[in-house]
């Protein structure tokens, strides 16, 4: 999926999904994607899992997204060794993050390194005014997942195939605003919900799987620190 560090992934803004659906009815691949997004929009939630490979880092994400809340665990490996683990929880407009690496906390929150060291393995509540808020909560709600599934320009329907042991309709296109090629796989059985994405740019690649379709149970951390400007 399109994620915080933008290795392969991007953030896409969509203003009016229903208007897009109507305007693309003559374009069959876009119409299929719009139909899948329509089914996704009424789902109570979805689990999605991504693995991203670059020349240096492997990133894995496990996410449970609901209507207004979600949670995510992200692990980063370098040469097979885990160098950082980050967790995110979104409950309404309250966004909490916890991280194991002080240097990542320092860079992510733009705070002093000595303060970042004290925040290792501690939940931090981020205000909506925080500059990275919109990037960190990407993919944590059903509407946000819908945004992540948009493709611009020419979209091509490929030959039906099997993806993750499921019959699938592949749609190939470009990630909006980039040269990243991606294939979105829609279920060819029952409702045409998305079941996966494969994205590539050069030697970098990512694979995402969707399901099951259920609402997440996200709980407010028992103890947390509230982010403030004095930490900078």
Image (spheres, grey):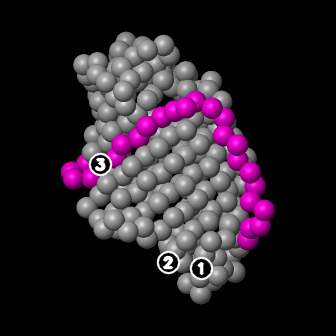
Q: Which residue is identified by label 3?
A: 205
Q: Is residue 178 above or below residue 143?
A: below
Looking at the image, is mark 3 or mark 2 earlier in the sequence? 2
Q: Position of residue 140 (x, y in %)?
A: 59, 45
Image marks 2 and 1: residues in contact by CB distance under 8 Å: yes
Residue 46: in magenta span: no
Q: CA distance from mark 2 to mark 1?
A: 7 Å
Q: Which residue is mark 1?
A: 116
Q: Residue 116, percent across and down?
A: 59, 79
Q: Nearer the viewer, residue 204 or 83?
A: 83
Helix, strand, or loop for circle 1? helix
Disc 3 residue crowd, few under 14, some 14–19, many 20+, Cα 10 Å: many
Q: Residue at x 29, y 18 (%)?
A: 160
Judge whether residue 205 is colored magenta. yes
Q: Which residue is mark 2?
A: 103
Which sits in the foreground, 175 or 57?
Answer: 57
Q: CA distance from mark 3 to mark 2?
A: 25 Å
Give the main secondary structure of the magenta stretch.
loop
Q: Quadrant of the N terminus?
A: top left
Near mark 2 (Cα within 10 A), the count class, few <14, some 14-19 or many ≥20, is: some
């Amino acid at each position: 999926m399109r994620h915080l560090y933008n290795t392969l992934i991007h953030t896409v803004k969509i203003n009016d999904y229903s208007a897009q659906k109507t305007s693309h009815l003559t374009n069959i691949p876009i119409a299929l994607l719009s139909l899948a997004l329509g089914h996704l929009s009424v789902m109570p939630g979805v689990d999605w899992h991504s693995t991203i490979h670059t020349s240096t880092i492997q990133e894995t994400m496990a996410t449970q997204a609901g209507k207004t809340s979600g949670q995510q665990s992200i692990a980063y490996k370098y040469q097979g060794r885990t160098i950082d683990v980050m967790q995110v929880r979104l409950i309404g407009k309250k966004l909490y993050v916890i991280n194991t690496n002080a240097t990542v906390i320092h860079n992510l929150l733009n705070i002093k390194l000595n303060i970042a060291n004290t925040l290792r393995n501690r939940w931090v509540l981020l205000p909506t005014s925080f500059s990275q808020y919109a990037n960190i909560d990407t993919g944590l709600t059903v509407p946000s997942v819908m945004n992540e599934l948009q493709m611009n320009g020419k979209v091509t329907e490929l030959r039906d195939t099997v993806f993750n042991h499921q019959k699938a309709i592949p749609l190939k296109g470009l990630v909006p605003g980039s040269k990243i090629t991606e294939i979105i796989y829609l279920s060819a059985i029952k409702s045409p919900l998305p079941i996966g994405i494969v994205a590539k740019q050069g030697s970098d690649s990512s694979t995402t799987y969707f399901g099951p379709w259920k609402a997440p149970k996200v709980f407010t951390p028992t103890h947390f620190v509230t982010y403030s400007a004095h930490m900078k």
